[in-house]
Image (cartoon, rainbow, N blue to C red):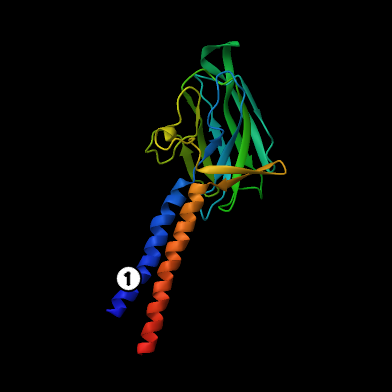
Amino acid sequence: MKKSLFTSATALVAGVAIALAAPLAASAHVGIDPNQSDPGTYPLITFKVPTESATATTTKIELTLPQDTPFGFVSYTPVEGWATELVKETLPEPVVTDDGEVTEAVTKVIWTAEPGSELTAEQYGLFPLVLGPVPDTGSVVLAVDQTYSDGTVVSWSETGADAEFPAPVLYVNDVPESDHHAGGGADDEHAEIVVDGDTAAAASGDTLARVLGIGGLVLGAVAVVIALTSHRKKDA
């Protein structure tokens, strides 16, 4: 009986850690801040890129901008250790905007890491862009391809609530999807801290609460294991 309890408590430690840690790992994805803007504005949008691989680093980020609702103005803030390339193309069809007819636009923004500046699993990349004027539409999908040092490419281009690799979405006239469920912004999962003008990603209260919950439950299970082990030694 005691051996059974000991085994169950040990399994509880592993089970709780795995079951509760899984949502935290799955929640890491490429996002943008802010994720909402008004038509006609020129927002500064920061792409937030985590590295999800434990063995490879992030070496390149490629953003694809829409051609049916193009941005007439694209400007980037230099990121230390990363080269930035703006790819401009002629549009398949001219697009009429408030600023006139647009026949060519930036369709891709490519950030490439210089040697030694690749993003590891312990790092979080921030890539700022000014995009505008924001089109008068429902939302704009900003698909991102993330390339790793082992050649793997993760395409953050899917849409919908069940997307495994969701694309960052800039909401204009539409309401962010998460607002329908929890009343928060689509990127509430990550907060930001500004220290001396530098921006760093930080876990929000919801993520922190889950981390503390994992710690509390695991510590409780460990206490059970220790107590049972001690009791067995006395019996021996």
What is the x, y in percent for residue 212?
Answer: 49, 57
Locate residue 19 relative to residue 126 in the image: left or right: left
What is the x, y in percent for residue 194?
Answer: 66, 43
User: Based on the displayed image, in which of its 4 quarters is residue 5 positioned?
Assistant: bottom left
For the residue carrying disc 1, how many other residues have a C-alpha within 10 Å: few (<14), some (14-19), or many (20+)?
Answer: some
User: Based on the displayed image, in which of its 4 quarters is residue 201 positioned?
Assistant: top right
> Which residue is situated farthest in the right direction here?
196
Give me the residue at 63% from left, 34% from top.
128
What is the x, y in percent for residue 232?
Answer: 36, 84
Q: Where, quadrant-wise, is the N terminus in this rendering?
A: bottom left
- The residue to which callout 1 is attached is 8
Locate residue 236 relative to residue 85 in the image: left or right: left
Closer to the camera in the image, 72 or 154: 72
User: Based on the displayed image, in which of its 4 quarters is residue 125 positioned?
Assistant: top right
Give me the residue at 46% from left, 31% from top.
176
**Quick check: can you spot residue 158?**
no
Q: Where, quadrant-wise, is the C terminus in this rendering?
A: bottom left
**Quick check: can you spot residue 120?**
yes
Is residue 109 positioned above or below 124 on the image? Answer: above
Closer to the camera in the image, 202 or 184: 184
What is the x, y in percent for residue 10?
Answer: 37, 71
Is residue 212 positioned above or below 113 on the image? Answer: below
Which residue type does callout 1 highlight?
Answer: Ser
Give me the residue at 62% from left, 23% from top.
42
Is residue 39 positioned above or below 44 on the image? Answer: above
Q: Secondary structure at mark 1?
A: helix
> Which residue is situated farthest in the bottom direction here?
236
Say how many tags the image has. Answer: 1
Give me the residue at 51% from left, 35% from top.
144
> Which residue is situated farthest in the left direction here?
1
Is residue 53 positioned above or below 81 on the image? Answer: below
